[in-house]
Image (tube, rainbow, N blue to C red):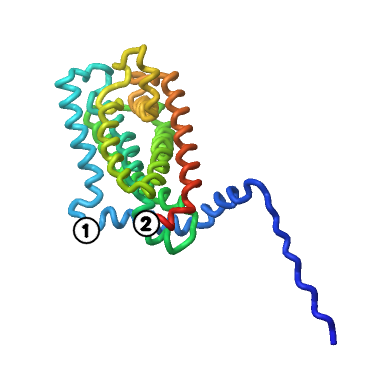
Amino acid sequence: MSSAEPKPQIHLVLEPGRADREYWRELLRYHELFSILAWRDVAVRYKQTVIGASWAFVRPFLTMVVFTVLFGHLAKLAQTTGAPYAILVFAGLLPWTLFASVMGDVSTSVVSNGNLIARVYFPRLIVPLSTVVVALIDFAVSLVILVGLMVWYLYVPGWQILLLPVFVLLALLTALGPALWAASMIVKYRDFRFIIPFAMQFGLYVSPVGFSSSVVPEKWRLLYSLNPVVGVIDGFRWCIIGGDSPIYWPGFVLSLAVMVFFLWLGIHTFRRTERSFADMV
């Protein structure tokens, strides 16, 4: 009788950082789940709505009208640049709306998908990232208004318009960091979700949406740029208006540094707390 064959030996390799590297590779392997969740969010957003995607058109348009009346006529800020004031306002409103949409959707995404997270394993970062697609679609719809304004005022942008996708990406990254941090906090402290709408409403008026950041006194301008949205809005306006709205480079660099910090903080906090999501949602 032949002796039993020896069992194959299993070698367990422990390597620092291996789990983190595998996590980021898993994000790519789960791309189909990302597509399914993104398409579901788009369908839910516009299903059984009266005006559908037109809401992404109406909301920024009405906001632009209010800001034009409030800041342009009442506050007399319409002459801060040589460009038409409506274009200046909308060039600031577009990145802010994208920022606010990502903040609102991503921060509540984990709680909204609690049933899925509690039952199935997958890289949890897929859930908040998939919600960004809806914000991008709303942004693309709203961009039509900007094109219409340029046609109406016969305003032709310069070569800087080619860099617009760069600042769209910066707007997404600027929102993603705080949004991921907020998503982690909301899982544990549910009442934290009520702070986000208030913060967005407050931020709309302290950010240079209805006015150019050049109206801020020079001695306070660098401090004002600690708000990372300031650099994004200034860059967005520069792409559309050009020399009529130059970038304040010291403030822009500071805004980028703050953005990088919050992006690191958001991802770090999310990765550190995501293992407990299934127990708390």
Residue type at mark 1 is Gln
Where residue 92 sits in the image (x, y, percent)? 30, 30
Mark 2 lies on residue: 113
* SS for callout 1: loop
Where residue 55 sits in the image (x, y, percent)? 22, 46
Q: Is residue 59 left or right of residue 14?
A: left
Mark 1 lies on residue: 48
Vertical side of 151 occupied by 128: above or below: below
Where residue 62 sits in the image (x, y, percent)? 18, 36
Residue 228, quarter of picture: top left
Q: Is residue 140 visible?
A: no
* SS for callout 2: loop
Which residue appears at 37% of the width and 27% of the height? 227
Q: Is residue 187 visible?
A: yes
Whichever of labels 2 and 1 marks the residue nearer the N terminus, that label is 1
- Alpha carbon distance from label 2 to label 1: 20 Å
Which residue appears at 35% of the width and 46% of the height? 189
Q: Nearer the viewer, residue 242 or 259?
A: 259
Q: Residues within 10 Å of mark 2 (few under 14, many from 20)?
A: some
Vertical side of 178 occupied by 241: above or below: above
Q: Nearer the viewer, mark 2 or mark 1?
A: 2
Q: Is residue 223 left or right of residue 4?
A: left
Where residue 198 sits in the image (x, y, percent)? 26, 37
